[in-house]
Amino acid sequence: MKINNKIFLLFTSLFILLLILIYFILKDRELKTLVLEDEIVKNRVNSLGKILDTKKLLLDNIAYEYSKNQAIIKTLKQKNKNYKFHEIASNLDISYFILLDNKKNIVYSEVFDTSSKEYMSISNNIRYFFEDGDIEKYLSKSRKLKFTTFEYEKLMFSMVKIENLGYIFVAKAINADFLNELSDILNTYVSLLPSYTLENTHKESYGFKYDINREEKENIYINIEVNDYLNDNFYLFLKMKRNIYNEIRQSNKLLLELFFASFIIFIFIIFVFINKIFTSRIEKISNTVKSVSKEKDLVKNIELIYDDEITYLSRKMNEMFKTIYESQNENIKKERDFLQSVLDSQQHIIFITDGTQIQSANKKFLDLFKNSNSFMNNIAILDNKTKMSLLNVAKTHSSIDKPAKFTINNSEEKYFVFDISKVEIKKYIVCMNDVSMYNKKIKELENKASVDELTSCYNKNTIIDYCKYWLNIKDFALIIVDIDRFKSINDNYGHFIGDCILRDVALLLKQHLHSDDLIGRFGGEEFIIAVNTEYKNLKRIANRLRVLIEQKEFFYEKYNLRITASFGCTYCTKEKDFDDYFNIADEALYKAKNSGRNKVILK
């Protein structure tokens, strides 16, 4: 690793450590801010409880005072439902004022909308609330806040028993006016939530359960569960500005940016100073030594700048390079000449490479390729797609079954395999063995193994393999041809004439098939034809071939023969295996044979 890199790594590590330390310090400040924020939330919820408790106390006082009112007592005693009080609800700015007898029947009621300042009729649902509800649990003398819901309207209420005569019920609706009043007192936005599920529940002294939502950076949301005597609990929703938290975050961000900028400036100054005085000069010496080691060029000189220890070391190294260069120059020349003579004496083509370029080659190489450019052009053709290095090409074509084909003098083709030996770091000796004759023999044997000797068509295994391959990539027509009464030809004219018929029929079929089509001898007098065509052309092509055979005159010695053939056809798609299609075509051929021969049956 370079000295500059080590210094950079040192200061980077120091920077990261200090950054982590500062991060945890600032994070601790932020966490303490969250604790403070929790306390503020707790106080805000406690303040809300106090305000609601004050409202509840007011309702309690109203209920108690009117429970002692003689007119109300008289009304309950007489159960006089026609008695009219003087707009108690509007005067007291409450939403409900209801008198009940001891059987929980409503004797007198006022329902006042504090927002619109209008009186409204009482609904049957409210009557059912008193008739079916357990009123005794509402009469607790505790100061506990009491809430309920009438007609989707959330209420804070108080209820008092009047001797043995009945009950008085007073309530204040938690409507927009009520919530705005709470918001003004708390200096916090307050709203209603119909439904919610508390998470990470906290509990306040007034019995409220609440949770805190900090999903937004600018605001904090407090969701408070309120016990509803009649329905499911409902929730109050408080929205507070996160002023302290955001100030701390902005402060932390500013401190982090100042630290980052200060440290970068400091590192830059120190780095420039060290680089100028020390590291750049050491790096120059190191680069010169590396260059000498790599290029074996001892003429290099190290630049001398200041009169100090590093300059003294540089001067001595320059003197050493000069001495070594003078003493080794002649020995190197002798070694190179000797190596070249050894290479030239070899019978095989040999060259030395670093993996991408040819550095040296023997006489055999130059006799065949003339120059390295001709050889590299052949490699480029071999490696047009993968763009492998020269060394990788040699490794790819290192076995007899994967020879590399070269074009010599723009016409002659030769095949070689490579043998690679590593002599030192990034230097390899590559030996090229000419396997052209061997490869030619292999090709001849492969061709002989795939072709029927008599008819020069593909043999059974080869034509089946081709048909299976075609079935994987495209649709095609399959035709099975069988020469009619071929056994009688062999019996009457001899097997030699029979072989001539097979040979000439195969030649006739090949001459009238497209170059893309395939024909193979399946066995005996039976041929398989794979035609690259559409379904609609299949029967027409098969009939054309049948007529060609029917009209052909075969002349052998003193014999003039005419023959016919039967055709079984099918069309192959990717739906089935080839064996299934062959069986279909074979059944069609069987039908053609049994229905009179010299026919084309498409199935």
Image (cartoon, rainbow, N blue to C red):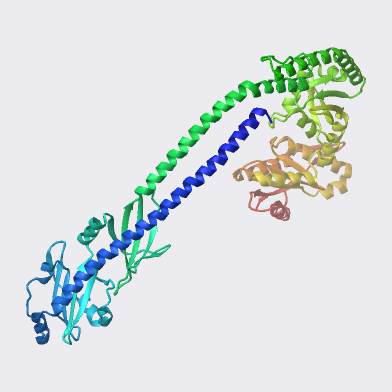
Instruction: Please state if 164 lies on the left or on the right of 34 as rendered.
Output: left
Instruction: Please state if 503 lies on the left or on the right of 538 as rendered.
Output: right
Q: How many marks?
A: 0
Q: Residue 525 or 485: which is nearer the viewer?
A: 525
Q: Residue at x 61, y 45 (%)?
A: 535
* 532 up-or-down from 419: above or below: below
Q: Residue at x 70, y 46 (%)?
A: 479
Residue 493 at x, y percent in the picture: 87, 44
* 496 up-or-down from 397: above or below: below
Based on the displayed image, in which of its 4 quarters is residue 110 positioned?
bottom left
Q: Residue at x 41, y 45 (%)?
A: 249
Q: Residue 543 or 210: which is nearer the viewer?
A: 210
Q: Residue at x 25, y 57 (%)?
A: 183
Instruction: Please state if 504 lies on the left or on the right of 588 as rendered.
Output: right
* 14 up-or-down from 57: above or below: above
Residue 309 at x, y percent in the picture: 71, 19
Q: Which quadrant is home to the N terminus?
A: top right
Instruction: Please state if 163 lies on the left or on the right of 471 as rendered.
Output: left
| Residue 590 can be seen in this image | yes
| Residue 564 can be seen in this image | no
Based on the displayed image, in which of its 4 quarters is residue 136 positioned?
bottom left
Residue 311 at x, y percent in the picture: 71, 17
Looking at this view, name the residue that lies furthest to the front: 308
